[in-house]
């Protein structure tokens, strides 16, 4: 299930499906959401799900019907490889000035 919009044209009305950043997680329908095994019971969970088309949806598990961010496969690949390379390790330093 995707967000649908009705578009009026000279030829009539058409329905267009679109997946956009910020749309409700509920509007995406039934996806196989996955969270890290490192997530704990205190609600510190980010979940990801593969979309039927190119891309991955990301949401906060504490708000499953809230807004989701949509990323392309290339963007997710760059993120995951950057995490593996340690590019974001500084974010774990809670004592750093921010």
Image (cartoon, grey):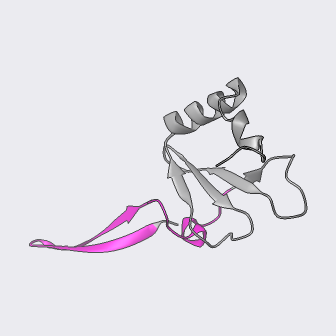
Q: Is residue 40 left or right of residue 3?
A: right
Residue 94 x, y percent position in the rendering:
78, 47
Residue at screen point 77% across, 51% down? 35
Q: Residue furthest front?
A: 97
Q: Is residue 92 left or right of residue 59?
A: right
Residue 65 x, y percent position in the rendering:
63, 73
Instruction: State whether residue 53 appears in this view.
Output: yes
Instruction: State whether residue 33 appears in this view.
Output: no
Residue at screen point 80% across, 47% down? 36
Pick the front one: 16 or 33: 33
Above or below: residue 23 compared with residue 55 = below
Q: Residue furthest right?
A: 41
Magenta part of the protein: which range? Answer: 3-31
**Residue 15 occupies which quadrant of the picture?**
bottom left
**Residue 92 occupies which quadrant of the picture?**
top right
Residue at screen point 63% across, 29% down? 82
Residue at screen point 77% across, 57% down? 45
Q: Is residue 69 left or right of residue 11?
A: right
Residue 19 forms part of the magenta stretch: yes
Residue 91 forms part of the magenta stretch: no
Residue 85 x, y percent position in the rendering:
69, 24
Pick the front one: 59 or 7: 59
**Residue 47 occupies which quadrant of the picture?**
bottom right
Pick the front one: 58 or 6: 58
Residue 74 x, y percent position in the rendering:
50, 34
């Amino acid at each position: 299930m995707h967000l649908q919009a009705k578009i009026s044209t000279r030829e009539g009305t058409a329905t267009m499906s679109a997946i956009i950043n910020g749309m409700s997680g509920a509007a995406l329908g039934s996806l196989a959401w996955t969270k890290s095994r490192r997530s704990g019971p205190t609600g510190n969970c980010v979940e990801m799900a593969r979309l039927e088309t190119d891309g991955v949806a990301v949401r906060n598990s504490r708000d499953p019907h809230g807004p989701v961010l949509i990323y392309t496969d290339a963007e997710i690949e760059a993120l995951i490889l950057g995490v593996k390379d340690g590019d974001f390790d500084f974010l774990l330093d809670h004592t750093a000035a921010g």
